[in-house]
Image (cartoon, coloured by chain):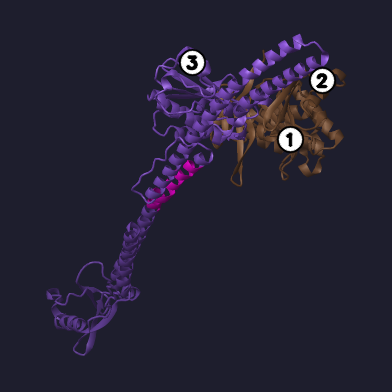
Chain colours: A brown, B purple
């Protein structure tokens, strides 16, 4: 029995557009488990990113509850949410948002300093993470404009993991990368997950979705279905067919 | 009349404000110095020059007397300029004191226009602030008056018109007949009443028509059955094939007439199909206003509603609640208990009265068309309300459950969640 990390009850999110209320998420009851690599899929406009932002406390839901363990975060104010995100969540976006005027290492340390003031310990942790994602010492010293997209995204992952978050949220992390560098980033995420990191990733890319062990399919703001795939193994045809069959069933 | 008085009142208030400001602006302060008094002060100081300690200020002016080197020899009070330099800065008047044709000292006459100017400034600010406060108060008061007299009645009227448009004629328009819309709304309510009467008459005529059809169908079916029976006997006894075929033809036609009569009777039951139900997504919080509208006698306390997205037609749902509350008022006439919550995959709104409920054998029939319970005979009604409500709920993918609760009749309106198909 896996531990429930995040739980939602009747989670709904609405936006007002020209006086018309649009319900983007509708009554979502969901449990996210520790150690899972959960992938949220769906067509454009299905509400994938909105769900990710609501789950991660980046945005407040219009209705319903979100509980992180015993904490109900849906009732938090903006300041409390900021502290919650800083302490428990890591984020990887399609756009990497590294600060151009700081070296790659400093980008990571700056994020770490928000939680931990022990620079030595941070440095050690950062070096471990950089080694784990395959970024050399030379690259760590470079500035974001001097490194490749794949390296930058892996640096983004290190930055997201520096505070040892309970969940890593990734919104289309390979969306802006080419095939080869995208694969490196996916390998990095898979490796993190194998070491116990819980990951929630939004994607509409089948190759990325394959990395998850639990696939949720979102349609019109509601979860249409889900599929348990088990741990990722490279070249596992059966697993690949199960995913394709599930997505076909969902009308992908 | 009231508005004219109000308008005149506003004009009066503004006129008073403008007059006060004009008075303030027009009032000019006499800043000229009284030369005679000044001359008298100088003369008296010159006269007392050799015994200034005995000098008495008889002019009422404020001044300081200095000797030629600048020592203060006399002052009328504290806070005055006591050197030439200070006097220049303060724009005071400096006059020479002469004795035996020689200048022996200076008299510094205090310039008192600064405090005067400050006092004028303070008065102006206070007057302007008071005028602004008065104007704001008048505007807020007027806005409140407009809201109470025009906007609020309009909102009530709007809800009422929506219900009438939706075909719900049971809820009366509760309006204050003293206000601006009094007579207007009364006419509206009379219109509703007349429409309701007309609809009742129509329903009654329909029911009578149906009774007639039922009676006729029964009357027609009996001779048709006789014709069929006789033809069957005739067919059995017929000696030649042609006669037998004729009898069979009669039997087939008799069956056809029977089917037509049955169709004629059931066709009138299909008229409900004409009521359109257009469900869409709505927030559960909107139920509060629907329940408030339906409970116009305020017999129930507002329930706690948890937030979620529902799938329903607001207008028809209002009609369902209106019907349930109207029934409770009509048959039980007790306080009501309203509760909300999830139930069997639906969002359920339960309305329970305190009237002891209905007979168990009547429960399954309550939603039937034209059925009226044993305790309903004394009240007006057509026996259609729950039937139509049930039909509406089914069209919204929901349900209407009628059962006996602990205290009385309990009607549960089960509303579908948005995208519940997807959830299932």
Q: In what element is the residue under mark 2?
A: helix
- Magenta segment boundaries in residue numbering: B143-161
Picture coordinates of residue A50, whole percent (x, y): 66, 35
Picture coordinates of residue A117, whole percent (x, y): 61, 32
Disc 3 residue crowd, few under 14, some 14–19, many 20+, Cα 10 Å:
few
Which of the labelled discs sits on residue A242, or is there none? 2
Q: With A82 as the anchor, is B339 left or right in this view?
A: left
Disc 1 residue crowd, few under 14, some 14–19, many 20+, Cα 10 Å:
many
**For this rendering, which residue is in front, B362 or B78?**
B362
Q: CA distance from mark 2 to mark 1?
A: 31 Å
Disc 2 residue crowd, few under 14, some 14–19, many 20+, Cα 10 Å:
some
Picture coordinates of residue B387, whole percent (x, y): 54, 25
Q: Which residue is mark 3?
A: B362
Which of the labelled discs sits on residue A201, or is there none? none
Tags 1 and 3 on a common chain: no
Q: Disc 2 or disc 3, which is closer to the eye?
A: 3
Q: Which residue is mark 1?
A: A156
Q: Quadrant of the N terminus of chain B?
A: bottom left
Q: Earlier in the sequence, mark 2 or mark 1?
A: 1
**For this rendering, which residue is in front, A59 or B364?**
B364
Provide the chain ID for the residue under circle 1.
A
Q: In what element is the residue under mark 1?
A: helix
Q: Disc 2 or disc 1, which is closer to the eye?
A: 2
Tags 2 and 3 on a common chain: no
């Amino acid at each position: 029995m896996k531990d429930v990390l995040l739980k939602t009850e009747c989670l709904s999110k609405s936006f007002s557009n020209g006086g018309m209320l649009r319900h983007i998420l509708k009554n979502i009851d969901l449990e996210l488990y520790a150690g899972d690599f959960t992938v949220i899929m769906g067509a454009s406009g299905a509400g994938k990113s909105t769900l990710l932002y609501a789950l991660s406390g980046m945005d407040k839901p219009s209705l319903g509850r979100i509980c992180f363990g015993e904490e109900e975060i849906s009732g938090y104010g903006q300041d409390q949410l900021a502290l919650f995100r800083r302490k428990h969540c890591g984020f990887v976006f399609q756009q990497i948002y590294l600060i151009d005027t700081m070296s790659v290492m400093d980008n990571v340390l700056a994020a770490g300093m928000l939680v931990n003031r022990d620079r030595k310990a941070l440095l050690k942790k950062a070096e471990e993470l950089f080694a784990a994602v395959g970024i050399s010492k030379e690259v760590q010293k470079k500035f974001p404009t001097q490194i490749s997209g794949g390296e930058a995204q892996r640096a983004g992952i290190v930055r997201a993991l520096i505070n040892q978050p309970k969940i890593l949220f990734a919104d289309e992390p390979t969306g802006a990368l080419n095939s080869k560098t995208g694969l490196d980033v996916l390998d990095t995420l898979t490796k993190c997950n194998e070491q116990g990191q819980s990951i929630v990733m939004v994607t509409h890319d089948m190759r990325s979705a394959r990395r998850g062990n639990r696939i949720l399919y979102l349609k019109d703001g509601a979860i249409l279905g889900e599929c348990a795939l088990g741990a990722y193994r490279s070249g596992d045809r059966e697993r690949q067919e199960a995913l394709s069959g599930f997505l076909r069933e969902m009308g992908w | 009349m009231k508005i004219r008085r109000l308008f005149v009142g506003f004009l009066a208030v503004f006129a008073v404000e403008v007059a006060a400001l004009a008075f303030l602006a027009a009032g000019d302060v006499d800043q000229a110095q009284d030369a005679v008094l000044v001359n008298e002060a100088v003369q008296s100081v010159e006269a007392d020059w050799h015994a200034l300690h005995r000098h008495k200020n008889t002019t009422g002016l404020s001044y300081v007397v200095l000797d030629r080197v600048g020592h203060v020899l006399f002052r009328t009070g504290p806070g005055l300029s006591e050197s030439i330099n200070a006097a220049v800065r303060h724009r005071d008047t400096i006059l020479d004191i002469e004795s035996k044709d020689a200048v022996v000292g200076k008299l510094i006459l205090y310039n008192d226009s600064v405090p005067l100017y400050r006092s004028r400034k303070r008065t102006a600010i206070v007057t302007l602030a008071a005028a602004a406060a008065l104007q704001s108060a008048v505007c807020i008061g007027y806005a409140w008056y407009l809201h109470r007299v025009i906007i609020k009645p309009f909102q009530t009227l709007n809800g009422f018109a929506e219900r009438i448009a939706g075909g719900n004629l049971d809820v009366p328009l509760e309006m204050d007949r003293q206000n601006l819309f009094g007579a207007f709304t009364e006419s509206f309510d009379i219109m509703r009443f007349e429409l309701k009467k007309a609809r009742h008459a129509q329903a009654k005529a329909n029911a009578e028509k149906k009774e007639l059809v039922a009676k006729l169908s029964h009357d027609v079916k009996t001779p048709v059955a006789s014709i069929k029976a006789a033809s069957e006997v005739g067919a059995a006894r017929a000696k030649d094939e042609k006669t037998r075929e004729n009898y069979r033809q009669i039997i087939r036609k008799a069956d056809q007439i029977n089917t037509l009569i049955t169709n004629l009777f059931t066709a009138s039951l299909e008229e409900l199909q004409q009521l359109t139900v257009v469900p869409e997504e709505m927030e559960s919080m909107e139920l509060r206003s629907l329940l408030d509208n339906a409970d116009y006698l305020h017999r129930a306390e507002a329930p706690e509603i948890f937030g979620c997205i529902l799938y329903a037609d607001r207008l028809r749902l209002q009609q369902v609640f209106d019907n349930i509350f109207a029934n409770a008022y009509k048959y039980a006439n007790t306080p009501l208990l309203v509760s909300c919550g999830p139930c069997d995959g639906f969002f359920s709104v339960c309305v329970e009265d305190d009237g002891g409920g209905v007979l168990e054998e009547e429960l399954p029939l309550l939603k039937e068309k034209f059925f009226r319970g044993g305790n309903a005979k004394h009240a007006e009604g057509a026996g259609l309300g729950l039937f139509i409500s049930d039909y509406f709920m089914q069209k919204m993918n929901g349900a209407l459950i009628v059962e006996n609760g602990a205290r009385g009749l309990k009607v549960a309106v089960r509303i579908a969640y948005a995208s519940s198909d997807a959830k299932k």
